Amino acid sequence: MAAIDIQHLTKDYGNGKGIFDITLQIEKGQVYGFLGPNGAGKTTTIRHLLGFIKPQSGKSTILNLDCWEEPKKIQQQLGYLPAEIVFPENMTGTQLIQHTAKMRGIHDKAAAKQLAERFDLDPSGQIKRMSKGMKQKLGIVCAFMHDPQILILDEPTTGLDPLMQSVFVELIHEEKRKGKSILMSSHLFEEVEGTCDSIAMIKQGRLISVTDAQSVKQLDKTTFRIHFQNLLDFQSIQQENFFIREAHPETMDIVVDIENLQLNALLRALADREVVSIHEIKHSLEDSFMNFYHKGVDYHV
Amino acid sequence: MFNSRLFAHLAKTNFKTFFITAAALSVLIGIIMSVFTPETMTDIAQANENAPVNPLGDISTLIAFVANQYFGNFALIFGMIYAVIIGNKLVASQVDKGSMAYHLSTPITRTQYTFTSFLYIASSLTAMFALVFLVGVGVAELVQPGELPVGAFFVLSLGSLLLNLAISGITFFASCLFNRSNQSLALGGGLTIFFFAANMLAGMNDSLEILENVTIVTLVDSAAIISGEGYAIQLFILAGLALVMSLLGITAFNKKDLPL
């Protein structure tokens, strides 16, 4: 049984806006990245999971409970961090944490306290005076304090400084080890690259690819930047049968994509030439992401 | 349907609005009950004997004055403002700002949220008018014992409460129906102002009397209440209106998509 199961979910807002036939499953203990530019449909999908929107067709379930029919039961097992977090007015952070604990029927405040300390958050002030980062931390405390089985995090690191971002990534790894199922949306590649097992890319309301994060890192090609000593070698290498992505005559640099099978051919070609330096350029998720977007690949997985 | 923790939260976060309205209403009734003694009333009546229009309306007795000026003006205006503000604030404004996402991500249903919210509105209004009744009777008994017919004053307070409950039913319904504060205020606040203005205009000129039939304010018939007959059905209508509008609001909120 998948922890989160979305089947053919469609909501058409007209003008090509909305989400169309989204199907995905998130298993227990899986961290699932949801990647896409602003307005692609990430938040619309998440709104369905929270039971805020009724699906036009298709359905979504969390722990086998229908998201539209039984949000209350789901909420007991769910931690949610919205993209733009807004809290009720006229409360201090401490009051908010206490109220959240009461609503959830939690008597033990240790977890909330621990989370606040971990994120270096002093919740005693009025929420409306808090910075964006502090509100985000408060949101994280409220989403994680009841140790939920399912976590839905919409652009969770917005407003956090790099130090806190790494604290957050650590927290995600811990939750994953505890067997939590996590759906995390983002438009930041690094955020999902380091933490997610699977990455779904969404564009104009359609899933365009679901990738295993491991396979992104082990693509079957490698990119090198090679710096030559003299112009002759720089020019002659371009006659060889390699895919030259960039060539800079002024610095005598080339950037070349090598299929892994071609590696020996490249080494042989370089052996005859005066090479100053050679660097591997790491393939990031960003490249893979940009590939999908720029080529306008439009298929379903 | 009811969630006591949410109720406590609403009472706490909206205490300021409640306190200001309740305090203003209590102070006003206190002043009226202490200032308008039989002697003052005769003086005012004599001073205005030859005036073409009496700005204070029927001031022959204390209870008539309270009915016209206090329940006809002050309590109506303050109650209406409270109903419009709180009705909008508890639902539409939370959706508009986004804090509804916080409420609904705790384990409660939408019905629990809206039902508890309306119950808060209704009980805060009830507390307010109970306070008005107690302060009014208390001050009157201290300053001018025996002048205030307590029974009629009680029914007037009750009528005013029911009227404000009906209005808050309407503002609450508008608040549940719309996702934007400005739309909710346009319907809820707009209707409220219309009722108030129609009531005022109807009293000004005989040719405008027909407006009495389009406003719910006239359902509290103060002359009938003071004379003690023929006011009950109208009050039941107000109570029914409050009930129906709030149920419609709860239903509308359950069915709609929330932009959270």
Image (cartoon, coloured by chain):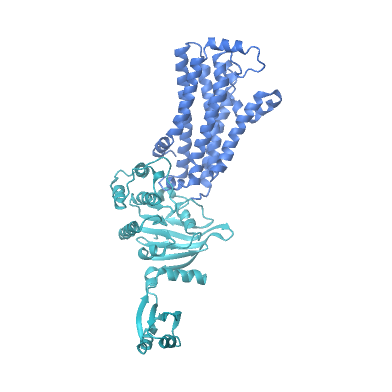
Chain colours: A cyan, B blue
Q: Position of residue A269 (x, y in %)?
A: 38, 88
- Front residue of A76/A160: it is A160
- Place of residue A138 in the rendered image (x, y in percent of width and height, measured from the top left): 36, 49
**A85 to B246, vertically: above or below:** below
Q: Residue furthest front?
A: A250
Q: Is residue B232 above or below residue A254?
A: above
Q: Quadrant of the N terminus of chain A?
A: bottom left
Q: Give A123 or B110, whichever is nearer the viewer.
A: A123
Considering depth in this image, is B92 or A232 the residue closer to the camera? A232
* Number of marks present in the image shown: 0
Q: Residue at x 37, y 58 (%)?
A: A181
Q: Is residue A63 visible?
A: no
Rendered location of residue B220, percent (x, y): 58, 24
Work out whether residue A267 can be spotted: yes
Q: Position of residue A4 (x, y in %)?
A: 41, 58
Quadrant of residue B232 in the image?
A: top right
Q: Is residue A138 above or below residue A281?
A: above
Residue A25 located left or right of residue B44 = left
Give the farthest residue toward the bottom: A272
With A72 as the anchor, is A108 left or right in this view?
left
Q: Nearer the viewer, residue B4 or A1?
A: B4
